[in-house]
Amino acid sequence: MNPAWTALLLSLKVAGWATLLNLIFGIGVGYLLARKRFPGRDLLDTLLTLPMVMPPTVLGYYLLVLLGQRSALGAWLQDHFGFSFIFTWQGAVIAAAIVAFPLVFKPARAAFEAVDGQLEQAARVLGISEMAIFFRVTLPLAWRGILAGVLLAFARALGEFGATLMVAGSIPGQTLSIAVYEAVQAGQDDVANTLVLLTSAVCIAVLLLAGKLAPGRIANRM
Amino acid sequence: MQFDLHIHKTLQSGQRRFELDVVVRSDCQRLVILGPSGAGKSLVLKAIAGLMTPDTGYIHVAGNTLFDHTASINLPPQRRQLAYLFQDYALFPHLNVAQNIAFGLAHGWRNPSAKVQDEKVDYWLEALHIKALARQMPHELSGGQKQRTALARALIAEPRALLLDEPFAALDQPLRISMRKELDSLQKQLNIPMMLITHDAEDAQVFGEHVLNLQDGRLINIVKDAA
């Protein structure tokens, strides 16, 4: 297969898994921050926002320290499962997920905060359990705001370079952004051109889709 | 006793402090709490519905203990079996009229389908003259239609009592008069106790068998009407 397609498929696989993780944790954390009061809430928000402003290489370094074989977690995984996040595609998933996470939980939090609490109260009085209220009232009303963030995060994960380079720089087959870097380093301009055009096309498609789901559109509909 | 309550709650917000201390014993089917905004009327209703927990006291409605501080009883709102009509109706914006009405009938994690067919729903659509609106979304309804939908949604589960928060405040004068009549006949027909809070003395006149005046968190005098 053409190496450009291999790179695209690997990038889609990594970004897809990263987005799935972010969907689950982003909804959970967004809801927690929007609806619950607990000590350290602002600190948690700040820490989870950090990937947005920190250099990805710094994040990648943290991940190496946390997940590398000299770390407690890395050693444990290696001893018990013979598995390591470092220099595997799963490591690239973790890196991409963390870098894109603020793009999911921030809009999710805002979307949950925009849901009128009185609707949840009305559902309570009607005898509906808290869990059912979340799935029948809160989540459907926040859904489009969350989905727009998830698509942005997918696009961000697709283009992840810095943290991925640190954690999974030389995995068999390369993600698009790393393949571009290496093609340029090796002076293979034609390969780089193909990869760059391919990456641009995919990102534009994702952004167009995200734009269609932007929260402003729902506001007009309601 | 239809309503037997003692609600005590202190709210503190910065320098401001509000104390609600209300004792009600009434055997009337129609109780009205009249008072200016900020008197604590909504808090009384929320406490009865279980949406606010009093610091001390007890709440008995139609012979059921919903809250008793000394006995450590505090039923969650889900188990109080009350109908609550919110001031701005609180209809679910993502569900059509029939789905809104059927909402409390479905207890799982999924909402009733958009094409929901149910005898009870049909009965209430008919009773409140909104049959033609069954598939409309809440944002397409007028104020009066929203109120009918909210009433049907609240009454379909055969509640022990009906709580109404300023039910006519958002309606214009002619509609207010006709909705008062309708609520009047609905209450007679259902024969469940009703508590209505309002700032409008006219509402109190029309509905109050028993009118209580609430000011600054306290009941100031009790006017009992012979009718």
Image: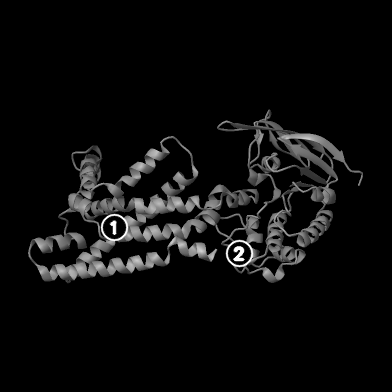
How far across and down, in percent of the image, does residue B144 sit? 71, 62
Q: Which residue is mark 1?
A: A157
Question: Are the residues at dot 1 and dot 2 in contact (C-beta closer than 8 Å)?
Answer: no
Colour logic: one colour
Residue behind mark 2: B139
Residue B49 against residue A179 in the figure, above or below: above
Same-subunit check for callouts 1 and 2:
no
Q: Vertically, is A61 above or below A152?
A: above
Residue A194 found in image quarter: bottom left
What residue lies at 64% left-to-right and 55% top-to-bottom? B104
Q: Quadrant of the N terminus of chain A?
A: bottom left
Give percent across and percent down for residue A66.
24, 41
Left/right of residue A182 with respect to residue A134 in the rendered view = left
Chain under label 2?
B
User: How far is the residue under mark 1 from the one under mark 2?
Assistant: 38 Å
The disc labelled 2 sits on which kind of residue?
His
Secondary structure state at the residue bearing disc 2? helix
